[in-house]
Amino acid sequence: MKIGKLTNEELNKVVLDKLHISRKEVLIGSGIGVDCAALDLGGEYCVLSTDPITAAEAGAGALAVHISANDIAASGGEPFAMLVTILLPPQYDLVQLGAMMEEIYREANRLHIDVVGGHTEVTDAVNKAVISVAAIGKTKKILRYEDARPGDKLILTKQCGIEGSIILCKDHPEAAEAFLDTSEKALLPEMEQQLSVVKEARIAAQMGAIAMHDITEGGVFGAAYEMAEAAGLGLCINEAAIAVHPVAQKACAHFDLNPYRLISSGSLLVIWHGDEQPLLRALKDEGIFAACIGEFTQGEICTVESGILMPPTQDELFKIKK
């Protein structure tokens, strides 16, 4: 099997088709493009998400916190607690574990999230650290892809490629030293502060977003495809409107990768009904760049420039051999 997420076809056939919801408390279960389960606890909804970090080594603790918190926020919820599982290979020591936990606590605390439990183990079943976070949130309204309609807009926040380029630069420092200039290297700490989409998701949800999706494996093209598929609609994407972070442009050019299919936590996709300008202005007022990059249709999932868009496959990051 290829490294990375299963294809949508494989996921449906081997995993999802074997899962069936039987409890009345479960409003949303597993599905393509569905990052959060939702439970009805009587008067308020609990949203849950879980994700591992397997593609990154340096900074994995911070990434683990953000990708799970982002899932909760993209569902319209407020993340408030996390369970953290850490699997370490025997060559790790307590100093490294301590540093990882400090990183996890720092980022969770910054988002007002409590780490309430988990599991820590040393095992020869892994050859590098694996961190998996289960995030818990709450909301009074569940945002659903099936509420999207033809004519709804697709909004992208920030610039795609933030997470992927951070991973590439940290895990391949010698290469990054060669392809980044001094000003671009200075952007890396700032980029790490942009990995959360909790703020823009809260703004979009409060203003009436139809549904949202944070951009992880498969990049902006993969996330957009999953949204359209889950909504049962076509989607026309204007590739020229997609902002790519300058560091991501440099990294992708160096490693011959497609920035639109590169893992991109830090950017959020929002389905929006009607005039998108009020949302864009509200985000801009909070220092968050955003742009309309597409429109949902009754037709195919495609891009203006290259035609029909294929389902998401292996993330570009996994094409790099360490």
Image (cartoon, rainbow, N blue to C red):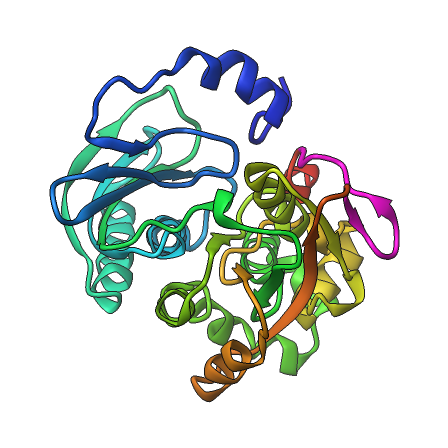
Residue farthest toward the right in the current orientation of the protein: 306
Q: Is residue 222 left or right of residue 210?
A: right
Quadrant holding the N terminus: top right
Whether residue 171 is visible here, answered yes or no, is: yes
Q: Residue at x 63, y 49 (%)?
A: 224
Question: How many numbered marks does the figure carry?
Answer: 0
Over which residues does the magenta segment extend? 301-313
Q: In the image, residue 82 lies at what x, y percent?
A: 21, 47
197 or 166: nearer the eye?
197
Say whether residue 216 is magenta.
Answer: no
* 115 relative to 156, above or below: above
234 or 94: nearer the eye?
234
54 or 158: nearer the eye?
158
Q: In the image, residue 110 lies at what x, y percent?
A: 25, 68
Q: Is residue 153 left or right of residue 297?
A: left
Q: Residue at x 43, y 46 (%)?
A: 144
